[in-house]
Image: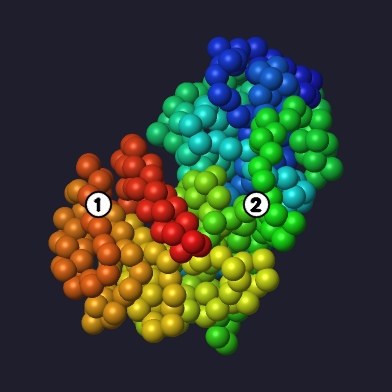
Amino acid sequence: MAFSDRADAGRRLAVRLQHLRGDEVVVVGLPRGGVPVAYEVARALEAPLDVIVVRKLGVPYEPELGMGAIGEDGVRVINEEVVRLAGVSVLQLTEVEARERTELERRARRFRAGRARTAMTGRTVVVVDDGIATGSTVRAACQVARARGAARVVVAVPVAPPGWEVRLGADADEFVCLDTPEPFFSIGQFYGEFDQTSDEEVIACLERAAPRDPAPAPTSKSDDDPAPRDEEVEVTAGPVRLGGHLTLPESAVGIVVFAHGSGSSRHSPRNGYVAAVLNEVGIATLLFDLLTVEEELDRANVFDISLLARRLVNVTSWLRSDPDMAHLPVAYFGASTGAGAALWAAAEPDADIAAVVSRGGRPDLAGPRLAEVAAPTLLIVGERDHVVLDLNRQAQAQLRCESRLVVVPGATHLFEEPGTLEAATEVARDWLTSHLESSRR
């Protein structure tokens, strides 16, 4: 089978996806080449069109050879075998990822041009590309969709090599492909016209597409309320500046600052999912990197709880100096070692923190400071995370503030089991909403 161009491929692919019409569907294209294909699919299904930006990680001395991919919300897919065979060091991988992450964020800002992301929570997300070669970028996109709450993920492509579904594993629930020819050398060999898609063409497709979502009902808004913000920021934390992502919904009731765990960053897909849920109920969020890239290379810094707590205190002061957010009560959300840092910071005499949530956290790392925490504290632990569960019980016994321990059935440390992250997030959302609203009264 040969396609005249990407639009032709998209129209043919849409025919195979008609069974999805009428569902709560969101179509996402992978920039750049996948977007013209996705545009035709979205138009045929009368579904909103969005993008998920992904970037291939190329081997340093042979960039066309992919050793993995990254996606929005911190998703990272690494081919450990390629990394090993190519002799790529940890530092080289970090440098390539940092460079590609910068480009990914630039493209995401350019393609959306200030438009909000299309909500994916509870919906069927159709991930569309112009074809599959290795599958790493599509895998990354699927994981982004999952992190944003997709109930079902469908991968749809015009052409792919035989056995392509195996490469994606459990990252998708349904696979649709028009042709799997053999031999398969490249995607372009199956297109009559396969010129590189430009940024301008991607933006044009997004602008021509149907409205992403119905306009929200108008809400009462004071003239003094700041304009909504959804942007990358540089956060001042003492002597360093750290990358962060700030989302400030209209008429926000408070702001939650995230302290991620060891080995994670502001791009954590789990924290990104939690933040998106909080944003939907009017809570602002700040996800930021606790350490610089150079600091992360020294593993001792990752477990330096006092250092991480100082960063949280510095960032909280930075937020309170911003005119848009100075009036908002602040809460902390910590995961893993970040929970110890959040409680340590909340124990500062003048912290004035409205609430703390620890998910799969290590509150015990706050040590003797636990008794000084005044903020209402919620501890969420997986039922099967036995060691951490015991440590949380011990830590709760040392707290003198309002506290609650919630054990999520069937969950392990990372809440990877179906439904467990959603369950933990609902409990955290309700706790934070209640205490942030109480702090405003």
Left or right side of 353 for 424: left
- Quadrant where the N terminus sits is top right
Q: Which label sits in the foreground, 2 or 1?
A: 2
Name the residue tied to disc 1: 406
Residue 135 seen in the current view:
no
Tag 2 secondary structure: loop
* Gap between marks 2 and 1 measured at Cα: 31 Å
Question: Front-most of 6 and 17?
Answer: 17
In percent of width and height, residue 320 lies at 58, 74
Q: Is residue 293 left or right of residue 323?
A: left
Image position, residue 345 (x, y; %): 40, 77
Q: Amino acid at mark 1?
A: Val
User: Residue 282's spot in the image, x, y percent?
Assistant: 55, 50
- Where disc 1 sits, the SS reads strand
Q: Amino acid at mark 2?
A: Glu
Q: Residue sitting at 67 percent across and 46 percent down?
A: 220
Residue 359 location, quadrant: bottom left
Task: Using the image, determine if residue 84 lies above or below residue 176.
Answer: below
Residue 90 in the image: above or below residue 117 = below
The foreground one among 354 and 362 is 354
Which residue position is annotated with label 2?
250
Residue lying furthest bottom in this view?
A: 239
Q: Residues within 10 Å of mark 1 (few under 14, many from 20)?
A: some
